[in-house]
Image: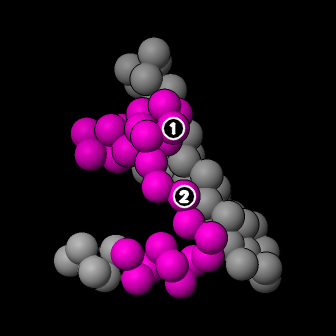
Amino acid sequence: MATITLSYDEENAGARGILDVVLSTGFFKQEYEPNEETLEAIRELREGNCKSYGSFDEMINDILNEA
């Protein structure tokens, strides 16, 4: 099971985002430079305008069906 947390400080123009990935085997952080599409997705998550999935497989199936 994996938990992914995206965070980005829009108020600090020089800020870098942090991608936290927690896996059953360990933990790591990776810095990233979010593009506008990622920022929009984070905004939607904060506002609650996003889909909720009961399982990882359900999310992957939805993504594949939209492709």
Q: Which residues are magenta?
A: 34-62
* Residue 48, numbered circle: 1
Q: Are marks 2 and 1 in contact (CB under 8 Å)?
A: no
Tell me the SS state at disc 1: loop
Q: Amino acid at mark 2?
A: Ser
Residue 16 visible in rendering: no
What is the residue that sits farthest to the left in this orientation?
67
On the image, numbered disc 2 is attached to which residue? Answer: 52
Whole-percent x and y of residue 57?
53, 84
- The secondary structure making up most of the magenta span is helix
- Residue 33: name its quadrant: top left
- Rendered position, 21 above or below 43: below
Closer to the camera in the image, 39 or 16: 39
Q: Residue at x 45, y 15 (%)?
A: 11
Q: Residue at x 38, y 44 (%)?
A: 41
C-alpha span from label 2 to label 1:
10 Å
**Magenta includes 61?**
yes
**Magenta includes 37?**
yes
Q: Residue at x 54, y 58 (%)?
A: 52
- 55 vs 49, left or right, is right
Residue 4 visible in rendering: yes
Closer to the camera in the image, 33 or 39: 39
Query: Looking at the figure, which quarter contains the N terminus?
Result: bottom right
Circle 1: is it few (<14), some (14-19), or many (20+) Cα within 10 Å?
few
